[in-house]
Amino acid sequence: MEYIDNIFTGILVFPFLAVLFTLPYAVFQYNKHGAVSKYRTLIIYSFILYMLIAFFMVCLPLPDRASTVGNTWQEHLNLIPFKQIWLYWHDKALGIAALQEYLVSMSLWQLLFNVLLTVPFGMYMRYYFKLSLKRTVLYSFLLSLFYETSQITALFGTYPGPYRMADVEDLICNTTGGTIGYYIASTFARVLPSRDEIDRRCRLYGTRVTGMRRFWAALFDYLCIAALYIFLVGVIRILNPEFAGFYVYGELQSWSFFCAISLVQVLVTRGSTLGHAVCKVILVSEDGGAASAGQLVKRYLYLWLFTEVPLVIAGLLTNVRFTVIIDLVILALVFVSRLYFMIYFVNVVLRRGKLMPHDKLSETLYMVVELPDDAQRGEAIGTVQAGMDE
């Protein structure tokens, strides 16, 4: 039951970890491979889930802090291989009854558990990470050493004393499990796409500027510029303690700041923000040539107008004497302002990269950078215009 609880705990914690991991993962995949493969994503996320559950298996349940006071590492360290097996069979007569009793003993099941724990690790090492047998054995040993170190150090000093036994037997069993997984992986590799096949498909799709690629680039930009905005507001507050921040429509200033910083970036780099650069895309003219400064200015000006003019009007209306009607009008204007972002998500992400009004009016579009030849360059432009997705 304890092991099942640990598995459920890992499954419950995993979504929160995945949320933190997804943006860096997506940006890295676009930067390195040009696309986010469904197979690769499934493999990587399942590997993270497995590692999380395995760690919980080793360290949970956590004890009460008071119960670990006075525990010493000498009492929780065993350097004799298979000591529990030897103690179990000591002074026992070998026979059918004794063997049957041993087959249901915790001593045997603990040994088997430590072997099975790292079998998936060895499979991942060979199938996806393409490691040799020697490296798989080494990494399995190091993983087990990490587990045993976390136990003997009381979760690296989290508790006053260790609460689980660090056993050399676990090192042997975990390393054996990783080795077994290495050999089992060849069976699964026959029915699953190989790592080389996954990379080949990514290179094929890497010439396309998909809706999701634009989305992740925009999200990366937004978070970076938001961090800069918060930092600058903090500096202002230090220099001017009476500064209380932007009140009712502070969002107006923050989004205007986003548009301004993005415009400065694309003007300096001739088409790329930081988010564009890490996702390997660039803004170009409709004909595939470099976008002019005028086109880039118009693009972000239109984006600002479509999203912020309703908020500007709403801000002016706040000076009008409060009435229910004015309040409803302000609420409607705020909704209209956010509506463009809803349309963006539907049009670009769900409808596979369709161009937005500020794209069309400024006669700009996205193209993948570092394309090998002009043929792929033309294919990428056609892909954006057609709105193809991966």
Image (cartoon, rainbow, N blue to C red):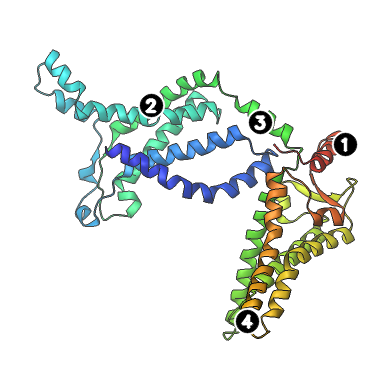
The amino acid at mark 2 is Gly
Other-residue count near label 3 (Cα within 10 Å), few / some / many at <14 / 14–19 / ≥20: some
C-alpha span from label 4 to label 1? 61 Å
Task: Determine whether the residue tagged by mark 2 lies in a helix, strand or loop.
Answer: helix
C-alpha span from label 2 to label 1? 50 Å
Q: Which mark is residue 318?
A: none
Which badge, 2 or 4, comes first in the chain's sequence? 2
The amino acid at mark 4 is Thr
Q: Quadrant of the C terminus?
A: top right
Other-residue count near label 1 (Cα within 10 Å), few / some / many at <14 / 14–19 / ≥20: few
Q: Image point 68% across, 84% down: which residue?
A: 320
Which badge, 1 or 3, comes first in the chain's sequence? 3
Q: Position of residue 227 (x, y in %)?
A: 61, 64
Frontmost of labels 4 and 1 is: 4
Which badge, 4 or 1, comes first in the chain's sequence? 4
C-alpha span from label 1 to label 3? 22 Å
Q: Image point 64% across, 74% down: which residue?
A: 249
Frontmost of labels 2 and 4 is: 4
Q: Which mark is residue 374?
A: 1
In this figure, which residue is indicated by the disc labeled 4?
Answer: 323
In this figure, which residue is indicated by the disc labeled 3?
Answer: 199
The amino acid at mark 3 is Asp
Q: Nearer the viewer, residue 245 or 368?
A: 245
Which badge, 4 or 3, comes first in the chain's sequence? 3
Which badge, 2 or 1, comes first in the chain's sequence? 2
Above or below: residue 330 compared with residue 133: below
User: In terms of image quadrants, where is residue 14?
Assistant: top left
In this figure, which residue is indicated by the disc labeled 2?
Answer: 177
Q: Nearer the viewer, residue 80 or 95?
A: 95
Task: Determine whether the residue tagged by mark 4 lies in a helix, strand or loop.
Answer: loop
